[in-house]
Image: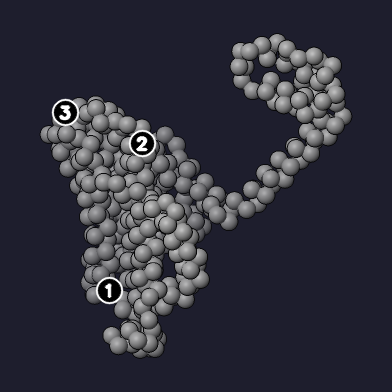
Amino acid sequence: MADPHQLFDDTSSAQSRGYRAQQAASGLGYPATSTLPQAAFLADPVSNMAMAYGSSLAAQGKELVDKNIDRFIPVTKLKYYFAVDTVYVGKKLGLLVFPYLHQDWEVQYQQDTPVAPRFDVNAPDLYIPAMAFITYILVAGLALGTQDRFSPDLLGLQASSALAWLALEVVAILLSLYLVTVNTDLTTIDLVAFLGYKYVGMIGGVLMGLLFGKMGYYLVLGWCCVSIFVFMIRTLRLKILAQAAAEGVPVRGARNQLRMYLTMAVAAAQPLLMYWLTFHLVR
Amino acid sequence: MAFTLYSLLQAALLCVNAIAVLHEERFLKNIGWGTDQGIGGFGEEPGIKSQLMNLIRSVRTVMRVPLIIVNSVAIVLLLLFG
């Protein structure tokens, strides 16, 4: 389109021309001329320097982000929670829906650090909660669509509503753990993982509700609620009531009783939230 | 069901403001929740009440300055955007 000689002299238009040519072909004939301005772009010494400067800036920025990312997001700790494989996911999903036959709920340790989820089905992970959350949003969109109530901003509203409830739950449980002075190794990320497991039951309930109407929804949701209740009690009992549960002694004493109440309250909040977040999706 | 993250932030700001306005001398001492009345020796378990009092005192100490900033920002935003 333009005179190639002009591109040699004017580096700014050469840069913009080269940049636009590198973008997806807009079909205006740029692909035909893309080789010529790019050759001119690279041969020009000033734009060479500009490119080198730009790439060094980018490398510096990347270094800065890599150095400081660990301060805000504990990346290495997060990697532990995503070290899963298919067998683990299958077993864990089965455990979430049918926890009644599982005998040993202890997490195995390997020299003071918990074993990665890949090797122990009792270890918490963040893969299932993350995937379940996203699937829940998509299923909510599907459910709203079948009732002609869908609009794209409703998806965002569902997502932020579920996230807000999750954040509220985490804060409430951390606050009550602090007040009851429980010496537990339950980290915040562990807690987020445990609280995210209820999305699996919610997805099952809503899907059954879509297929079989209200009866199917109530049946499957009821089953999943009871399963999550049992799952949470058995898992949290080991974390919160560590000493008593490890010996298998039934809990006595005021302090242990308070901890037991806390565990039951956390576990009871799960079915309530499961119902609250899904009942408006199934009509 | 419009429980968004933004409303959660607003609620959190209001709660922290509520904790910050509890005056130590005029109010907390009168209901027996002052921090010099709470420490019950070096027993193992502090108990819920002294944990709460510690929490209130630490929230008031730590959040004093950030609350000024966040409240000013919130006031300006609410004035501008309603």
Q: Are marks 3 and 2 on the same chain?
A: yes
Which secondary structure lies at badge 2? helix
Chain identity of mark 3? A
**Looking at the picture, how far across and down is residue A35, in whole percent?**
75, 15
Chain identity of mark 2? A
Which residue shows up at 26% across the image and 40% down it? Answer: A202
Identify the residue under disc 1: A255
Which residue shows up at 23% across the image and 36% down it? Answer: A281
The amino acid beneath tag 3 is Phe
Q: Is residue A63 above or below residue A170?
A: above
Foreground label between 3 and 1: 3
Which secondary structure lies at badge 3? helix
Which residue shows up at 66% across the image and 11% down it? Answer: A29
Identify the residue under disc 2: A153
**Looking at the picture, how far across and down is residue A233, in whole percent?**
26, 55
User: Which residue in the rendered view is the most extreme toward the left?
Assistant: A215
**Looking at the picture, how far across and down is residue A240, in whole percent?**
33, 63
Residue A97 visible, this angle: no
Looking at the image, tell me whether mark 3 or mark 1 is earlier in sequence order: 3
